[in-house]
Image (tube, helix red, strand yellow):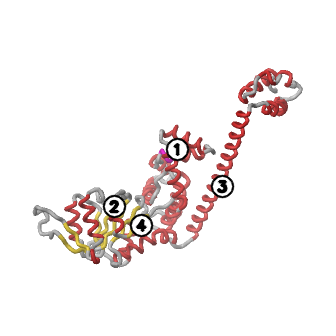
Amino acid sequence: MGMSKGSQIAFCRNLMKKKGVADDLIDIEAEIDETLSFEENYKILKPKIEALMPEDKKLEAQVTATICREGQAIAIAHEENAKHIAEERERGIQEILASDNSAILKKAFEPLRKLTKMVFEGYSSGLIVRGNGAVGKTHNVLAEATENGNREGVDYAFLNTYSTPLEFYKALYENKDRKAIILDDVAGLFNNERTIALLKSALWGIGGRRIVQYNSSTDRLGSIPDQFLITAGIIILTNRLPTGAHIDAIVSRCHFLELSFSRDQVIQLLYDFAKHIEYKGMNAEEKLKVVSWIKENTNEAYDVNFRTLLKMFDLYRFDKNGWSDLAKNLLKPDRVISEYISAVASCGIVDEQVNQFRQKTGMSRATFFRIKAQLKEEVMR
């Protein structure tokens, strides 16, 4: 059953009101033809009503239409770009699965491997590597050292604890003649001015002679001298690096490597890693199945890394039928980034995206664009 004449009249009068057209400019009752459907009457009346709109309303309608078209164009472009990225990702994954060697892993960590070798062979006094946790910093530095015949406690020292500047000074002294001292995410390393001063002198010296000093008015040093020459290279592995002039001074004294990957790169690395490592009796098919699940059930809001993969492997080994349910309960996204992704996916116009994001998170417009820039930078890697 079609819309009644009374309902059509009410609809058209409401349309006139929205368009700013006075009721007395069109006799709606006379214009409605009962022999026609509502759609046919509307097609006839709509241009008549719009022709009588005030100029400001016409301009507003034009702007709205333009914004809608632009929003649709942006949405289409975003969808096409996402499709292209997805295709590139799948192509890369298929290349990994078809390959018999771990080329992706080797290429990703080649700069870190070479810089590590530089330090061990005495060509560099130090290296700082910054990157997200569990992306392979420690594994590759130690692997490079071991594969070249270096032994922990003989050729290099591995330190991952820290208490006081004095203890740090003693550790530097005790290992001063080794090829390298590896400091792995040592808590508080950059938070103490005295420790920072020790690092500066351990990384750089006049004429290449690096003299480390510890001035103390007490006998706390014991038999250790208050200064010594260090020849060991310093490798610092850290998830975060503070900012400031003192930190800049440390970075300027050695080589610095930013080791970070986009989500797509991480997924490719996980496939390569899963295919070529042995893990507690799991076969290749089982390991790749776990990686595929991670790929399909996470996005940029999740912190996915090698440690995540090993945890998922253990879940699979424990319960091959119910492991994915356990995984969903354990893997949690970053709520703010997740709301950003949701807003971008559901709204074509940027202002609408920002408004939805702010309503859901209580965060500012600036935060929205900071996350946007962060994710864009990751995609460009």
User: Which of the two discs, 2 and 3, labels the residue nearer the N terminus?
Assistant: 3
User: Which of the two discs, 1 and 4, labels the residue nearer the N terminus?
Assistant: 4
Query: Quadrant where the N terminus lies?
Result: top right
Instruction: Give the residue drawn at x 73%, y 34%.
Output: 55
Read off the magenta span: 335-339
Residue type pointed to by label 3:
Glu
Residue type pointed to by label 4:
Leu
Mark pair 2, 3: CA separation: 42 Å
For discs 3 and 4, the disc positioned in front in the rendered view: 4
Q: Is residue 333 among what the camera can see?
A: yes
Residue highlighted by disc 1: 339
The answer to which image quadrant residue 281 occupies is bottom left
For discs 1 and 4, the disc positioned in front in the rendered view: 4
Would you call the spot at circle 3 few (<14 residues within 10 Å), some (14-19), or many (20 or more)? few
Mark pair 1, 4: CA separation: 31 Å
Residue highlighted by disc 2: 247
Q: Main secondary structure of the magenta part?
A: helix
Residue type pointed to by label 2:
Ile
Q: Is residue 283 among what the camera can see?
A: no
Would you call the spot at circle 1 few (<14 residues within 10 Å), some (14-19), or many (20 or more)? many
The residue sitting at the right extreme is 35
SS for dot 2: helix
User: Which of the two discs, 3 and 4, labels the residue nearer the N terminus?
Assistant: 3
Residue highlighted by disc 4: 257
Seen from the viewer's position, the closer of residues 164 and 307 is 164
Return the x and y of residue 207 as percentages of the image width and height: 28, 78
For discs 2 and 1, the disc positioned in front in the rendered view: 2
